Amino acid sequence: MPHLVIEYSANLPGFNAAATLAACNGFLADISEADIKSRAVRHEHFLVGTASNGRGFVHATLWLLSGRPENVKQALSRGVLEAIEQTFNKPDDLDVQLSVQMQDMERSTYSKAFL
């Protein structure tokens, strides 16, 4: 059930999306390993603030079924951020922001089929 979407700016040539997804999935494996669905999206067109260059970002959104306590969500957010940091090589010429957002999926409206 966890869905992880990692978005990143195209000006990060050393960003290894596959390694980052693997590190995050490894951290999240305790939740429900076979149910983790993760993907990375590279953004060609982006701005960070008003600067036209010199800045980049990596942002993860972790979607989970609703009902988890706040402290669990905080720990998951920190763990995903740490997994991203472990695989990230910051370019010398860029200021890069790493961030994680937790989102609830409503249990009453989430549907899933196994094929």
Image: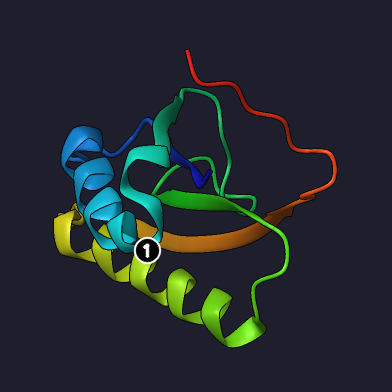
**Residue that appears at 58% across and 41% down:** 47
**Residue that appears at 64% across and 72% down:** 68
Q: Quadrant of residue 11?
A: top left
- Read off the residue under disc 1: 80
Q: Is residue 86 left or right of residue 82?
A: left
Q: Return the residue found at the far bottom.
A: 71
Name the amino acid, label 1.
Val
Q: Quadrant of residue 64?
A: bottom right
Q: Is residue 90 left or right of residue 30?
A: left
Q: Position of residue 21 (x, y in %)?
A: 28, 42
**Residue that appears at 45% across and 80% down:** 75
Q: Return the residue found at the far right.
A: 108
Q: Is residue 19 left or right of residue 81?
A: left
Q: Position of residue 79 (x, y in %)?
A: 35, 72
Q: Secondary structure at mark 1?
A: helix
Q: Is residue 49 left or right of residue 9?
A: right
- Using the image as rendered, state which of residue 3 and residue 11 is in the foreground: 3
- Using the image as rendered, state which of residue 29 and residue 15 is in the foreground: 29
**Residue that appears at 44% across and 50% down:** 57
Q: Return the residue found at the far top.
A: 115
Q: Position of residue 67 (x, y in %)?
A: 72, 68
- Using the image as rendered, state which of residue 5 and residue 76 is in the foreground: 76
* Mark 1 neighbour density, 10 Å: few (under 14) some (14–19) many (20 or more): many
Q: Quadrant of residue 103?
A: bottom right
Name above or below for residue 16 compared with residue 87: above
The colour scheme used to paint the residues is rainbow
Name above or below for residue 65 compared with residue 111: below
